[in-house]
Image: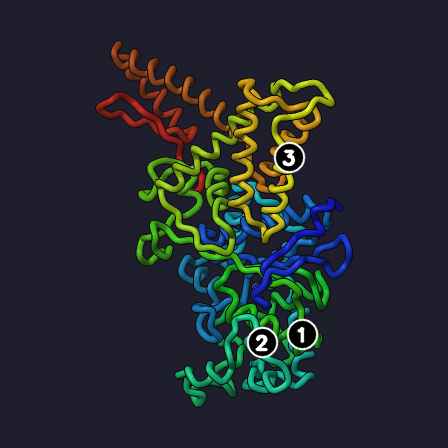
Amino acid sequence: MRPEAQRLHLYNSLTKEKETFTPLNEGFVGMYVCGPTVYNNVHLGNCRTFLSFDLVYRYLQHLGYKVRYVRNITDAGHLENDADSGEDRIAKKARLESLEPMEVVQRYTVDFHQVMAQFNALPPSIEPTATGHIIEQIAIIEQILESGYAYITNGSVYFDVVRFNEDQSYGKLSGRKLEDMIANTRELAAQSEKKNPQDFALWKKAEPRHIMRWPSPWSDGFPGWHLECTAMSTKYLGEQFDIHGGGMDLKFPHHECEIAQAEACNKTSPVRFWMHANMLTLNGKKMAKSTGNHILPGALFSGDNDKMSKAINPTVAKFFMYQAHYRSILDFSNDALMASEKGFYRLMDAVALMDQLPASPKGTSSEIDVTAWRQSCYDAMNDDFNSPILIAQLFEGAKFINTIADGSTQVNQEDLALLCQTMKAFLFDVLGLTPPQEGRQDHDHLKSAMDLLIDLRKSARANKDFATSDAIRDRLQEAGIQLKDGKDGTSFSLKNPNS
Ligand SMILES: [Zn+2]
């Protein structure tokens, strides 16, 4: 373990305070993050959440912890509007597109993994699915029924929030009081199978047209959405574990229900540190497909959208996200991204200089305090993963590198090695950025080759050799490269691999 691990503080959404992080078992961290419901392409807001926890995962590992990171895939049980009635999101998509539900699941799980890989996010240690843990979910329902905090109605099982709240407190994470929730509710109990509108489904009896169904002691049906996370976190991390993360929008009711289920079942508070990542807006407004204020990661990377002036490299988009703290709202806009891109390449240009920096002899004193600078990088990350402050420190490091390169600052060999090693560790291991050289070089090579082909095609046309000029265009098209003839000559674009 690095000594810096002693000073990690993180903001616990449960206590609403920054606390010193100590894991349950020395040297080991158990972390659970609510994963995507795979019924459509992953959106950028979700990506931000998963990238926030990728940073947490990477930094914990950098500190020397052995981390078991569990992030689930919701492939059943998540109904429309996060509600207890209505259609299953995956089944609905399957019906609309005439697909088998598992085809929908497969398609969007693959999309999710591809996007995460483009962002260079590390895969979790375990990625369990809801449908793969029906037995575990049924066992938990049986335990909750036994403890008296659930009841059966018409083959469905509901969690009895009022009964639970008599013994424990429901609402401690979101800071809501059950009395207020009851006072503000308009749902008529008479129309529902539930005793109280706040009760939530643990098991739902499937209606005849519901295709995703499993046998259970109560009915052929399916588990409630909140249950899978309790089942899978308990199975892989134990009845109590260190960190539970997710998007801010999951705090209530999803995480509140997870706490209630686990406490009813295991008689212990399941999570020691709750962490919530804030949302992402686009041009100052909430992102929503329905209003058109929306951009998918694939469209962002390909440039095939009307929100950005050009294609954005995934690592630049990730760098941009980390320039805001995970608990603040982040606004995506063309200007902000372009500014971020400049900064990113400034850092990478400094990195490219690192191998040829001159050092003054060993033992001579340095004109900059590299140890203090390195400490401030750790201080930033130890202060609730404050990536914007870390990045500011890395810009400071880039400034050091530039002044060492131009000879205006002297550092000795030890300090130079420490400076370079710290820059690399934070940029590539902790932030998980990808050095752009390869991509840039590839692009330069492609551009030279394309210029040549465009010139050849032009002269073929000038010689009325249309067979050759058409063949060049068609073969490029087959290879996914589109030529566009315009007023200013011919340009080319790459076909979006996600379309
Ligand atoms: Zn969850």
Residue 22, x across and y down, in percent: 71, 58
Q: Dots 1 and 2: beta carbons under 8 Å?
A: yes
Across the whole image, how many numbered discs are drawn on residues? Answer: 3
Q: Say which element carries label 1.
A: helix
Residue 426, x across and y down, in percent: 61, 38
Q: What residue type is labelled 2?
A: Leu
Q: Quadrant of ligand 1?
A: bottom right
User: Residue shown at 64%/36% (left/top)?
Assistant: 425
Q: Label 2: which residue?
A: 202
Q: Label 1: which residue?
A: 140
Q: Label 3: which residue?
A: 422
Q: Dots 1 and 3: beta carbons under 8 Å?
A: no
Indicate whether 198 appears above or below 76: below
Nearest to the observer: residue 95 or residue 320 = 320
Nearest to the observer: residue 156 or residue 313 = 313
User: Residue shown at 61%/75% (left/top)?
Assistant: 260
Q: Residue furthest left?
A: 487
Spatial CA distance of label 3 from label 2 is 49 Å
Q: From where the camera sits, is residue 213 visible?
A: no
Sequence-wise first label, 3 or 2: 2
Left or right of residue 80: residue 171: right
Say how the picture is coloured: rainbow
Q: Nearer the viewer, mark 1 or mark 3?
A: 3
Residue 292, x across and y down, in percent: 31, 53
Q: Dots 3 and 2: beta carbons under 8 Å?
A: no
Q: Which amino acid does label 1 sit on?
A: Ile
Q: From where the camera sits, is residue 399 visible?
A: yes
Q: Say which element carries label 2.
A: strand
Indicate whether 360 appears above or below 158: above
Residue 271 placement: quadrant? bottom right
Sequence-wise first label, 1 or 2: 1
Q: Which amino acid does label 3 sit on?
A: Thr
